[in-house]
Image (spheres, rainbow, N blue to C red):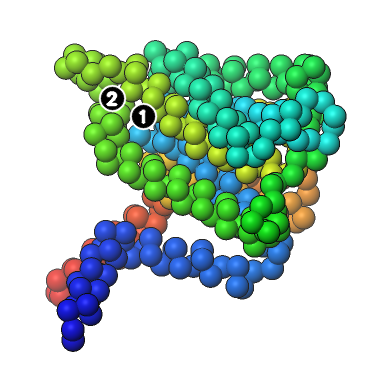
Amino acid sequence: MNDAQLTRASVAPGWVERLGVAHVLLALVLLVYPAAASDFFLTQIGGYTLILGTLALSLMLLAGYGGMVSLAQITVAGVAGYSVAIFGDNATHVMGFGWPWWIAVPYAVLLAAIASALIGWISARTDGVYTIMITLAIAMAMFYFTQQNYALFNGHSGYSGLQMPQFWGVVWRDPLPFYYVCLGVAVISYAAVLYARDSSFGLSLQAIRDNPRRMRAIGYEVTLHKVFAWFLAGVIAGLAGVLLVWFNGRISPGTIGVNAAIDVLIVAVLGGMRHPIGAFIGALVVVLLKVFAIDLVGADRFNTLIGLVFLAIVFASPDGLLGLWIRFRSKLDKRSIRPPS
């Protein structure tokens, strides 16, 4: 074996150990998924799951590591979505400044992050149910404001005809390119959350979550840490909002309604609020139920089904589906190391 082969052999295990076998296997599955999936499964299942999971990931960053449960993440995503419609092109002939996508999209994400930071600044001095109520009030206020404002948001109808850009000779809204765009955004957001978790900021944020009074006593700017966490979560939610607009081809007050806000919370809790990958697991469960179970139980009873599934999982494991898996795996490990009688 020559020196190059020895180098590759020594480096490869290190990368696998650093990423984790589960991450490597999951990445391979996601990369080859389009080879076995139809266009419907690529967009309506794969793409939508990744978008919804990215949106829930922004909530997981706040609630899991910062202890701040927000019902305004869909509002933040809506700020980005409406910004794309207003500053870009739309088919409603209201607003539509015609900015190129490479200017409109970063500007929309920045506005979403700033809006998220403002929400965080308002609610950072509260905790628990008070944070939930403040963010719920903001979400409801944004819903009614967009519904009643026609000059800026086009009222109840919202904006339609929002097309994903085409460049490099690729129609990015086609199923295969759109899936990989969603996958790329989800992977970048997921990696950013993992990096933030292990950084000095992430560790201090978790310490603030556990004991804010002690962190304030030793000199940490607790409010500033929380607001910055809201800003980071706003970037992730803004990216998801842009993809959601391109996925639906429109945005209206119904997109950012209270039901949608609660759906994001359900997704995060179902997967596991303290695990970044849990956001995508919960999103997959909800999307599969929405696509297939609604035909079995009907639209009128679908919310009841979601509620029953939610209650069953939460009662079985407060840490969601991922918590169930961790408990199951720990039991298997204990049985495997049990000494013979």
Please identify the quarter of the rendering in which residue 217 is found. top left
- Quarter holding the N terminus? bottom left
Considering only order in the chain, which callout, 1 or 2, is on the residue closer to the N terminus?
1
In this rendered view, identify the residue nearer to me: 57 or 68. 57
Q: Is residue 220 left or right of residue 315?
A: left
**Residue 227 horizontal/vertical position (percent):** 40, 21
Disc 2 to disc 1: CB gap under 8 Å: yes
Q: Indicate the secondary structure of the residue bearing disc 2.
A: helix
Q: Residue at x 66, y 52 (%)?
A: 167
Mark seen at residue 208 = 2
Q: Residue at x 23, y 65 (%)?
A: 14
Please identify the quarter of the rendering in which residue 77 is found. top right
Q: Residue at x 80, y 17 (%)?
A: 151
- 125 over 335 or under it: above or below: above
| Residue underneath mark 1 | 66
> What's the residue type where badge 2 is placed?
Ile
